[in-house]
Amino acid sequence: MIEKLNKVITEKSEKIMANEKVEGFVNNVGGVICFFGAIVFGIMFIIGGASLMKTGKNYVVKPSAEKAEEATSESTSTEESPATETSKEE
């Protein structure tokens, strides 16, 4: 049953697509859709790039002054006395 239905659909579609007018119309519609898709993609690419350039500073994480001071003080204290760390852990 499915094979028969598939055969009928194939025959009908080949008959329709063999018509040059239909084939040209389908190709033109596909070309127009592709063209407008490319235009929309280009516009969105430009808008997205401009938005990222405008708000790009929000995507770079900079440590605050207090955190930077804490990090430097911790690193200097660990460099000075590694032996005291082992005694603190025990």
Image (cartoon, rainbow, N blue to C red):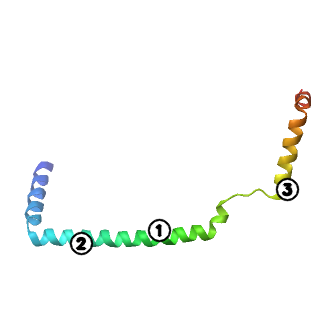
Mark identifier at residue 29: 2
Mark identifier at residue 17: none
Which residue type does callout 2 highlight?
A: Val
Tell me the element at label 3: helix
Q: Looking at the picture, does residue 1 appear above or below residue 50?
A: above
Rendered image quadrant of residue 5: bottom left
Which residue type does callout 3 highlight?
A: Glu
Q: Label 1 belongs to which residue?
A: 45
Tell me the element at label 1: helix
Q: Looking at the picture, does residue 11 appear above or below residue 50?
A: above
Q: CA distance from mark 1 to mark 3?
A: 38 Å
Q: Label 3 belongs to which residue?
A: 66
Q: Earlier in the sequence, mark 3 or mark 2?
A: 2
- Please provide percent x and percent y for residue 81: 91, 33
Q: Looking at the picture, does residue 90 appear above or below residue 34?
A: above
The residue under the point 59% across, 68% down is 53
The residue under the point 12% across, 48% down is 3
In the rendered view, does 41 fall on the left or right side of 77?
left
Foreground disc of the pair 3, 2: 3
Which residue type does callout 1 highlight?
A: Phe
The residue under the point 67% across, 59% down is 60
Around disc 1, counting alpha carbons within 10 Å, would you say few (fewer than 14), some (14 to 19), or many (20 or more)? few
- Please provide percent x and percent y for residue 11: 8, 58
In the rendered view, does 11 fall on the left or right side of 54?
left
Quadrant for the C terminus in the image? top right
Tell me the element at label 2: helix
* Residue contact at pointers 1 and 3, CB within 8 angstroms: no
In the rendered view, does 53 fall on the left or right side of 17?
right
The residue under the point 13% across, 58% down is 9
* Residue contact at pointers 3 and 2, CB within 8 angstroms: no
